[in-house]
Image (tube, rainbow, N blue to C red):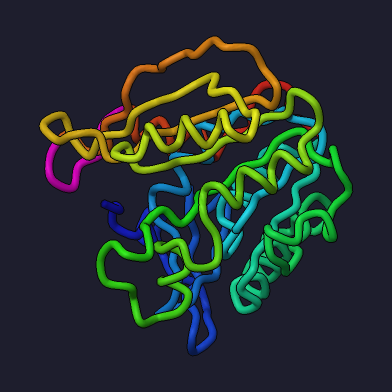
Amino acid sequence: MSWPYVDNLSGEGLPMLTDETCNEILGGALVIHQSRRGYRFNLDSLILAHFAKPPVRGSHLDLGCGNGIILLVMAGNRPGARWTGLEIQPQLAALARLNVQSNGLSDRAEIVAGDAQDIRRLFKPASFHSVIFNPPYRRLQSGRINPQEEKAAARHEILGSLPVFLSAARQVLKPSGRVCTIYPASRLAHLVCEFRRHRIEPKRMRLVFSDSSSPAQFVLAEGRLFAREELKVEPPLFIYESRGVYTKDMKDVFTGLAAPPDGASG
């Protein structure tokens, strides 16, 4: 399950190209250009950006960055950090570059067009303090594959998968570097197995529910490279308190994303 797209989180649309939309989000903290008919970010990405707590300094990588939404949020309120986005689809990489420029973040963020499976060619080993990704998580044999290429690649394991992204992360993380991701709760066992297979120990998790009467939809997970066993399970996150009405915790997510974390001033 994915929650509704969030074009309307923060008000009025801005001038746009024919095949794009451009909207303010997070109370006007950012503007985001998106494909009108292709991949469009949703709440999953914002929830992950809020859950991840990368160092406010250092170098960080957003794998499969799409139009750059997670990287934009992170770079926007962490002026002392350097962010890199890697995106395999050229048209999405171009949109991500446009978004970086439109938000005045070119001094702290860059977009690289490339494949996570070619990570050794693109980046030096031990280049990043943290890696974050919202991977495709639907098996190729499960469900109808969207005929729109951008949407299909974002949802199904066509151009990337959890094992591919974890393998890439392990190759470019510094010792004790962090990985943060979001994944279907129904595949939690697979997530833990893959983390450990890549020598990334799960350290922090949070289950995400649509509402209090629904089963868990997603799990947020943070792991550390070559760390010892010790897992903290955080209180659950409920998105809606009633139909179309966000919970206080979800409103706090939006507020938190627009504000810089402690120690993040440039």
Q: Where in the figure is residue 205, as x and y percent of width and height?
A: 44, 24
Q: Position of residue 227 (x, y in %)?
A: 67, 17
Q: Quadrant of residue 37?
A: bottom left
User: Seen in the image, is 43 located left or right of residue 102?
Assistant: left
Quadrant of the image for the C terminus? top right
Q: The magenta stretch spans which residues?
A: 242-248
Residue 10 picture quarter: bottom left
**At 80% from the left edge and 44% from the top edge, which residue is drawn?**
82
- Residue 264 within the magenta-colored segment of the rendering: no
**Residue sitting at the far bottom:** 18
Looking at the image, residue 114 sits to the left or right of residue 207; the answer is: right
* Residue at 63% across, 27% down: 261
Residue drawn at point x = 55 percent, y = 47 percent = 163
Q: What number of labels is visible?
A: 0
Q: Nearer the viewer, residue 78 or 188?
A: 188
Give the vertical position of 237 relative to 155 (above or below): above
Answer whether residue 246 is magenta in the image.
yes
Q: Residue at x 50, y 71 (%)?
A: 34
* Above or below, comparing residue 13 to residue 176 in the picture: below
Residue 92 pos. (x, y %)? 59, 72
The image shows residue 127 at horizontal and vertical percentages of 85, 41
Seen in the picture, residue 113 relative to 187 is either above or below; the reply is below
Residue furthest out toward the right:
124
